[in-house]
Image (cartoon, grey):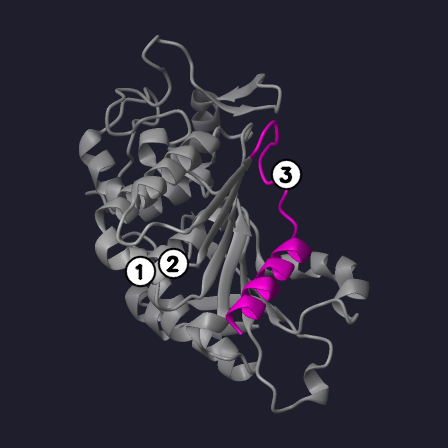
Amino acid sequence: MISKSEILSKWWGKEMRLKAAVILPRNYFEHPNQKYAVRYNIAGYGGRYTRANRFLGNMDWWTSDKAAEILNVYLDGEGPFGDCYQLDSENSGPYGKALIEELIPFIEKEYRGKSTPESRFVEGCSTGGWVSLALQLFYPDFFGGCFSYSPDQVDFENCQLINIYKDKNAFYNEYDYLRPIVRDVSGEPILSQKDFIQFENVLGHSDTYVTSGGQFSAFTALFSPKGNDGLPKPMFDPITGEINHEVAEYWRKHDLKYYVETNWETLGPKIQGKVWIWAGDMDNFYLNPATRAFDEMLKTMENPKSDASVSFTPMKGHCAEYNEIKVIEQIVEKLEIEN
């Protein structure tokens, strides 16, 4: 389905549309008055709503008595600078507002979703892991639970291997050694941060990663302010890697660890029983240190004590244990406990 967004169209001054795919439960047409809980799936980076077609490989399971009767919705992450991350941005526009106020209400009305927070779940892996967790945290009263696998960096003191607030350079560490950004599960480095960014620089129409449409283009569009040139302001120099700490401080409002820690008094009670996170301890993109730091922070929280489930598997890589059927079964288990 494709729906015009009045919110985004007004912001951009041109027609903007949102896309999603919906897979209906097996007995949907036999029960025209029944309403359903909804699973909102967010893709890994670059995933589009057409990934719903891959779920067709599970059709034997989905049409059997084993499968839960819930709506499966595949959100589309396409945005002006790469993935939109389903959140409001000074550069991409109010994608979060459009999702919460337009797209989700439209889907739930059109396809008989229950339209209650306790029946609305977000999940995904990698980019989808970060987005699902961020949506649960920034809209705690709107969603009833998130299942976040191998999320992008949830702590910017561990932004992969960079501490954006203290380090001087994104490409070289304190020992003047190239930072790796990708490794295999044995720990062997595969690609450096510098080479990764140089590749995005080539793709960008501004000759920088800011407009590449790649991973760091999307990060910059979401986390950074708008620059004097009308483009997102880079957090680090695209050629030298030198970090702009003024911009790094601006990123802090999307630092999920910092956000939870500083808003726990009001946020903590609202996310009780709603957060489940998994990471492999040999994440291929060095994302597990941030998730570890996030977990350690949660363990110190009081009034209330956090009941978030954060688990790690030794020697497992990025998204190694993510499985759509597993997530659906987790959602069903949560629904059964609450009912």
Write down the region rendered in magenta.
313-339
Mark 1: secondary structure: helix
Q: Which residue is mark 1?
A: 269
Q: Which mark is residue 145?
A: none
Which residue is more in the foreground, 118 or 31? 118
Q: Of the residues shown, which amino acid type is indicated by label 1?
A: Pro
List x then y, in percent, for residue 96. Answer: 36, 62
Quadrant of the frame with the N terminus: bottom right
Q: Of the residues shown, which amino acid type is indicated by label 3?
A: Ala
| Left or right: where 60 falls relative to 214 | right
Q: Which residue is mark 3?
A: 320
Q: Which residue is mark 2?
A: 272
Q: Mark 1 and mark 2 in contact (Cβ < 8 Å)?
A: yes
List x then y, in percent, for residue 197. Answer: 43, 28
Question: Which residue is at a point 37% across and 58% down the rendered structure image?
Answer: 271
Question: Which residue is at a point 22% across and 47% down the rendered structure image?
Answer: 262
